[in-house]
Amino acid sequence: MYSATRRLLESQVSTAEQRVRSQRRELARTIGSTYYELLLSYQRAALLRRQDSLYRRAARAARIRYQTGETNRLEQVSAEARSRELQNRLALTRTGILVQRQQLGTLLNLGQPVTIDTAAALVAPLAPTDTAGLSVGSNPTLALLEQEAEVSRRQTRVEQLRRLPDVRVGYFNQTINKERGFQVAQAGVALPLLGGVQKGRIQAARIGEQTAAAQLQYATAQLAGQLRGMRQQLAQARTSLTYYEQTALPQARLILDTAEKSFRAGDIEYVEYVVNTEPAWQIRLAYLDQVRQYNELVLMLQALTGPDL
């Protein structure tokens, strides 16, 4: 029984270690998610600054045209309102960046906001080992449930051994008034009297063992289904990123360049310039949103099947 109890305690230690492993994996995912969110926020701020710079120039041109009588008051007011709106959005984005820097510093236990390389790659890397498959070695949740099942099995074994007789043997010698030789030996067998109580404990332990095994089986099936769905979503997100990088973003650059040249040449007015360039800015923002979705899928997949950090 003592040997079985020792193995039970060792299993409980392993269970605690698996919980730490699971928490470490979740912390790594949270840190990665916060990092890429911060990186994308910097890119959104840069995009807003670029947009604001172009619209500021257009607003100055609209103001000059109004002063010279080449256009009406509506164009000037629209240009100023648009510029102020962009400045407000940029200010909100900068505030969000400060908050995210502080959050990342807290997660890294630095006690201060973090400074990152804003020119780093936006898209999270995905190695073949990150999608190798679902196993106890790659998934801490399954490892934890398997360890809990092992604890339940060993708990059942301990309860079963407690029903056995307890054989005890003892010996001691004693000196009384400087006279030696008083020796005593004893032996005995202890039998459990309340057998029904112990039988109930064994039955409860077996039920716990069956429950742990069922939870492991259910979690394995559930995580396998989740993994299949995530792989499909990841493939779709990768296809969407390829579309943006190869088709949509070059078209957005062409729209901006053409509209700016037409506005400078006087072929279109400010309102037309804003209307014509708005799709290009929406494409660029949509690309950043798609990158965010892809990165979240990559990080979730790494947390599900990737190696420990």
Image (cartoon, helix red, strand yellow):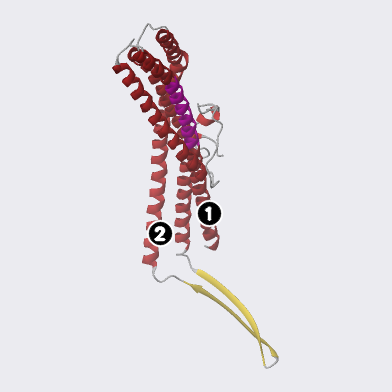
The answer to whether one can see residue 128 in this image is yes
Name the amino acid type tagged 1: Val
User: Of residues 292 and 220, which is closer to you in this image?
Assistant: 292
Q: How many marks?
A: 2
User: Of residues 53 and 169, which is closer to you in this image?
Assistant: 53
**Nearest-to-viewer mark from 1 and 2:** 1
* Residue at 37% in and 57% down: 204
- Note whether 149 is above or below 244 in the view shown: below
Residue 38 included in the magenta stretch of the image: yes
Name the amino acid type tagged 2: Ile
Q: What number is the disc on residue 202?
A: 2
Could you tell whether 235 is left or right of 13 in the image? Answer: left
User: Of residues 170 and 17, which is closer to you in this image?
Assistant: 17
Which residue is farthest bottom?
177
The answer to whether one can see residue 134 in this image is no
Magenta extent: 32-53
How dense is the environment of label 2, judged by Cα within 10 Å: few (below 14), some, or many (20 and up)? many
Residue 137 horizontal/vertical position (percent): 53, 39
User: Of residues 217 and 143, which is closer to you in this image?
Assistant: 143
* Residue at 51% in and 73% down: 189
* Residue at 32% in and 12% down: 71
The residue pinned by badge 1 equals: 13
Name the element at disc 2: helix
Residue 71 included in the magenta stretch of the image: no
Rendered image quadrant of residue 308: top right
Q: Earlier in the sequence, mark 1 or mark 2?
A: 1
Name the element at disc 1: helix
Residue 125 horizontal/vertical position (percent): 53, 27
Q: Looking at the magenta stretch, what is its main secondary structure?
A: helix
Q: CA distance from mark 1 to mark 2?
A: 22 Å
* Residue at 53% in and 54% down: 13
